[in-house]
Image (tube, helix red, strand yellow):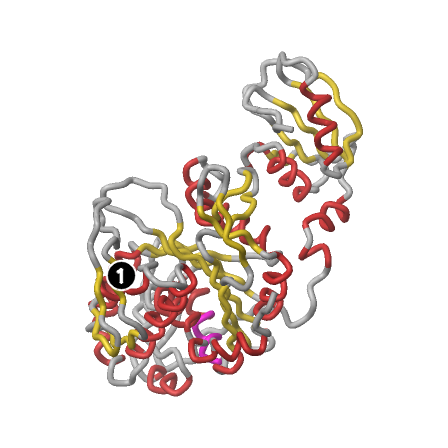
Amino acid sequence: MARRSGRSRQSANRAQTVFVLSLILLFLFIAGGIGYAFYLQVREWVASSDILPNMTSNNPGEGINWVPGQPLPTWEGTERVNILVMGVDERESEEGPWRTDTMLVFTVDPLTKSAGVLSIPRDLWVPIPGYGDNRINTANYLGDAYDYPGGGPALAMRTVQWNLGVPIHYYARLNFHGFVELVDLIGGIDVYVEETIDDPTYPDAHYGYDPLHIEAGWQHMDGELALKYARTRHSNGGDFDRSRRQQQVLLAILDKVTRLEMLPQLVPQAAQLWETLSDSVQTDLTLDQIVRLANLATQIPRENIRMAVIDETCTMFWETPEGQQVLVPIRDCIRELRDEIFTTEPVTASEEDPAARLEEEAATVTVWNGTLTNGLAGRTAEYLREQGLLVMGYDNADRFDYEESLIIVHTGKTFTAETIAQLLSLPPTAVVIENNPQAEVDILVILGADYQPPTP
């Protein structure tokens, strides 16, 4: 199959290399009260301006200790930082939970002063740890719906980490209300529409249609139109074109707010920007971390920012037995794409290959039957052996009225435990840490009434 080379893909995206900064800095750093420049050419102007309010918020957390005119705080870590950014379509008529409409991973390396972003299509069909195969955009929904520790963001982070083979350190979850209001606050944006868009079935907020028509050429867009342009899937490229339009819109926002003449207008609106976006942004980054990352971002040259989309070259269209139209990942292609964005050195086999990680842990397992179903432990033990796990034996549990299954980890080998939960279609909450170095096996699986044996 013919594929674009990494160099040509990088070149094709070069014009959109600031997308990651527009997303992260715009939504997080403005939300954190940073109405200052995102590039070095305006940083000096900002240093002499009183635009960092002395503010504290319960979300994302700590306030900012900074005196105008003094150097901005620096990011002190030396390890690469990866942040999962999610956009969710929160509708006023619904209470949630919600699937993610947009998902990307931002990475920055403080040592090499380089950054990158990988956009992930929402229809990518992947394993969601503990919940079987599904669209990747359901991870946030499942985590919130089933009380996964840390909620939807935590399960989404774990899912992306599992499938990409890179650690995810932080997350930011955004809704679209703040996006619309922000674009309106800055007076709209100018976007060049490459081809006429005619989408008669663009959805409205009430499960009907809100027909969308945008002529080709330069268009001035308010917040509502900009959001529609970024979200419509009505094109030959589908989700892939949609990702590129999102990059184009966010770049247009960045271009406008980073103009020197725009910054003085935004400064008096800092409180309004914060009030608007604080209800639209959820993140586990503190305000202090946001400021430090923003400062780090201003030190990254454009040529050191790499962009990529998991597009048609790395996926195959497939229809599930239930009739869902999804994208099956081509793992080798995604691995190559990931290495272009996230690594300066080759990753180890255990980082990129779940089977290698299982082999590295080499966890021993035993299975107990906590129900009245005869032979359940034996059949399950054999199934896990067929999956390559080191099952040492099986037996009856201390009682037969376990309502919920348990995967008890005695020696810290959690990757194997999470794999077992996924193989047995058990929720992540089934994994329990009970450190016991003296235990006969690393992991004890107790099957409860909630367990349904895998279909052969």
Residue 206, image x, y percentages: 21, 45
Q: Nearer the viewer, residue 283 or 97?
A: 97
| Residue shown at 63% from the left, 14% from the top | 373
Q: Amino acid at mark 1?
A: Lys
Q: Secondary structure at mark 1?
A: helix
| Residue shown at 33% from the left, 60% from the top | 56
Q: Going by the image, does 256 lie left or right of 367? A: left
Which quadrant: the C terminus? top right
Q: Nearer the viewer, residue 109 or 47?
A: 109
Q: Quadrant of residue 247?
A: bottom left
Q: Going by the image, does 210 lie left or right of 79? A: left
Q: Nearer the viewer, residue 167 or 456?
A: 456
State which region is magenta: 293-299
Say if the magenta span includes residue 296.
Answer: yes
| Residue shown at 70% from the left, 67% from the top | 346
Say if the magenta span includes residue 170.
Answer: no
Which quadrant: the N terminus? bottom right
Residue 161, image x, y percentages: 57, 53
10 Å neighbourhood of mark 1: few (<14), some, or many (≥20)? some
Residue 432, image x, y percentages: 61, 34
Say if 105 sits above or below 304 in the image: above
Whether residue 352 appears in this view of the structure is yes
Whether residue 273 appears in this view of the structure is no
Q: Going by the image, does 138 lie left or right of 129? A: left
Residue 443, image x, y percentages: 71, 33
Q: Which residue is mark 1?
A: 228
Q: Quadrant of residue 244?
A: bottom left
